[in-house]
Image: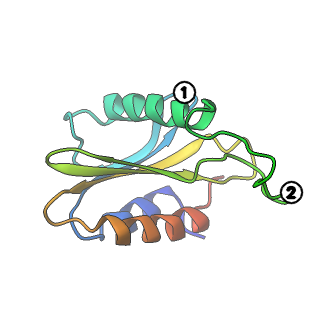
Amino acid sequence: MPGIDECLLEAMTLPGARGAAIVDWTSGLALGSVGESPNGDHEATAAETAEVARAAAEYQAFAPVDAAFEEPDVKGLPVEDLMLTTRTGFHLIRFVETTFDSSVFLHLWLDRHTGNLALARIRLRDISDRLALV
């Protein structure tokens, strides 16, 4: 199973990838980062994206629980990923299921003109499923 560095490097092979990070959304700290950062500071970007991820994961407005649709075998966060678009780029946040408290996500920043959001979403799902956090 690939570790943090291998997963980040794999994410950077996606078309239009400008930067990637693995972030703990409870603390806002980057566990690893590569490439560029939208504001020039990887740690500040990690803290800012953690705020967005935390809101989506914890607020029922973003992930309401509906007992009629909830599968009994599904555990963990109700949110799989988040997509934000700006005038110049795409931000994709993919929550990583872990054996511990699942408070980690993979953030990918893509160029709007050369990035492929659909492909990135599929590949980040695969990367996050294989990520080994030890």
Classify residue 133 by image quadrant.
bottom right
Q: Are marks 2 and 1 in contact (CB under 8 Å)?
A: no
Amino acid carrying label 2: it is Pro
Provide the secondary structure element on which disc 1 rests.
loop
Tag 1: amino acid: Ser
In front here: 115 or 47? 115
- Looking at marks 2 and 1 on the same chain, the residue that comes earlier in the sequence is marked by 1
Image height check: is 29 above or below 129?
above
Crowding around mark 1 (Cα neighbors within 10 Å: few <14, some 14 to 19, many 20+) is some
Task: Read off the residue under disc 1.
Answer: 27
Q: Residue furthest front?
A: 68
Pointer 2 residue: 72
Question: x%, y% of residue 127?
Answer: 50, 67
Q: Is residue 43 above or below residue 10?
A: above
Image height of 38 relative to 118, above or below: above
Residue 110 pos. (x, y %)? 25, 56
